[in-house]
Amino acid sequence: MAFIKRFAPFAIALSIGLFITSLFVDISMPRFGGKHRAKRRQYVEQLEQRNAELERQNAELRSQVESQTGTRNVIVTLPNGDATVTELPVPPIAPVAPIPPVPAVSHKH
């Protein structure tokens, strides 16, 4: 009987607290991952498809540049593997402009 006298107020207080909490917060069991993982996977697949499409366009544009310039491009892949540098023909050096003469300065006293 003493156990029931001590346990009953605790149980009543707990149930009232859960009821009041349920008015403000969802107290159902948590669902870990579910929709978030599916959305994340779909997003990564879209990025991979977009990356493949951009790589195809890049190769297409590179071949167009080669055909227009008539020179072979040299492609250097950087160590991280995600950037390339295309070497194009060097433009001619611009002529150097002549240096104008320095005017004579007259000292007035």
Image (spheres, rainbow, N blue to C red):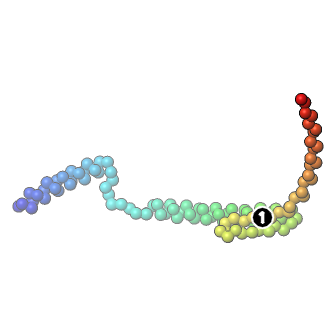
Q: Residue furthest front?
A: 109
Please determine whether, in this image, residue 89 is positioned above or below residue 105.
below
Which residue shows up at 90% across the image and 30% down it? 108
Q: Residues within 10 Å of mark 1 (few under 14, many from 20)?
A: few
Give the residue number, with chain letter if any, for mark 1. Answer: 86
Q: Nearer the viewer, residue 102 or 77?
A: 102
Residue drawn at x 54%, y 62% as measured from the top left: 42
Residue 101: which quarter of the image?
Answer: top right
For residue 65, above or below residue 108:
below
Q: Position of residue 39 (x, y in %)?
A: 50, 60
Q: For residue 56, which quarter of the picture?
A: bottom right
Q: Position of residue 53 (x, y in %)?
A: 67, 63
Quadrant showing the C terminus: top right
Residue at (32% x, 48% y) in the render: 24
82 relative position to 35: left or right: right
At x 13%, y 56%, the residue is 8
Judge by depth and name the residue closer to the eye, 94 or 48: 94
**Residue 84 as seen in the image, left or right of residue 98:** left
Residue type pointed to by label 1: Thr
Q: Is residue 60 left or right of residue 27?
A: right
Q: Is residue 4 above or below residue 81?
A: above
Q: Secondary structure at mark 1?
A: strand
